[in-house]
């Protein structure tokens, strides 16, 4: 065959006709389809000479060095984007947990203040004769009012 064709190979024409229709990822994914196309086209051409093409194999697809570098850059950028997304998601979860903790802390602090105020009002009303809970609350509110005016 090498003598008849020289440096020309009929399989090259079939590959050149089918590969440019695909992007690089599809080329790798459709290796078997390209091989079947080469097989059928070569079988048509070679059957006139009494040859039957039984099977063709595409062993490896070797893109240009510049294409490989570009693919590596694209893959690295994609992974960096995934890392950034995961970091942002982790930070979001931390902020939510921190906010939940602060909210719980403020809630419990509020409960403690209310319990303390209730105990103080009850103690004051029990220790001073003839004072009602309302009288004690009026005193507390007036005190808070004056404290607010000072600030």
Image: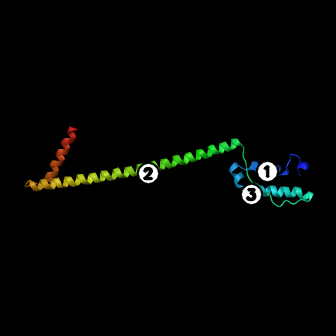
Residue occupying the far top of the picture: 150
Residue 51 in picture, x, y percent from top left? 89, 59
Considering only order in the chain, which callout, 1 or 2, is on the residue closer to the N terminus?
Answer: 1
Residue drawn 11% across and 56% down? 126
Considering only order in the chain, which callout, 3 or 1, is on the residue closer to the N terminus?
Answer: 1
Residue 134 in picture, x, y percent from top left? 15, 54
Residue 130 in picture, x, y percent from top left? 8, 55
Question: Relative to residue 41, is residue 111 drawn left or right?
Answer: left
Q: Are marks 1 and 3 in contact (CB under 8 Å)?
A: no
Identify which residue, 151 or 44, lies in the foreground. 44
Question: Relative to residue 78, is residue 67 drawn left or right?
Answer: right
Q: Between marks 2 and 1, how big is the CA–CA gap?
A: 51 Å
| Between marks 2 and 3 in the image, the one whose residue lies nearer the viewer | 3
Classify mark 3: residues with Cα within 10 Å, few (<14), some (14-19) or many (20+): some
Here the colouring is rainbow
Residue 80 sits in quarter: top right
Residue 125 sits in quarter: bottom left
Q: How many marks?
A: 3
The disc at residue 15 is 1
**Secondary structure at numbered mark 3:** helix
The residue singled out by tag 2 in the image is 93
Residue occupying the far left of the picture: 129
**Secondary structure at numbered mark 2:** helix
**Secondary structure at numbered mark 1:** helix
Classify mark 1: residues with Cα within 10 Å, few (<14), some (14-19) or many (20+): some
The disc at residue 32 is 3
């Amino acid at each position: 065959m090498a003598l008849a064709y020289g440096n020309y190979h009929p399989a090259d024409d079939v590959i050149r006709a089918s590969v440019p229709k695909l992007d690089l990822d599809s080329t790798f994914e459709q290796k078997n389809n390209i091989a079947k196309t080469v097989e059928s086209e070569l079988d048509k051409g070679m059957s006139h000479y009494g040859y039957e093409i039984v099977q063709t194999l595409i062993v490896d697809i070797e893109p240009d060095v510049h294409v490989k570098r570009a693919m590596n850059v694209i893959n690295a950028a994609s992974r960096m984007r995934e890392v950034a997304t995961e970091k942002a998601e982790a930070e979001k979860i931390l902020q939510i947990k921190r906010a939940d903790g602060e909210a719980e802390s403020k809630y419990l602090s509020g409960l403690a203040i209310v319990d303390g105020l209730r105990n103080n009002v009850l103690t004051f009303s029990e220790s001073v004769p003839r004072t009602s809970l309302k009288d004690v609350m009026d005193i507390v509110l007036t005190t808070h009012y004056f404290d607010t005016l000072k600030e």
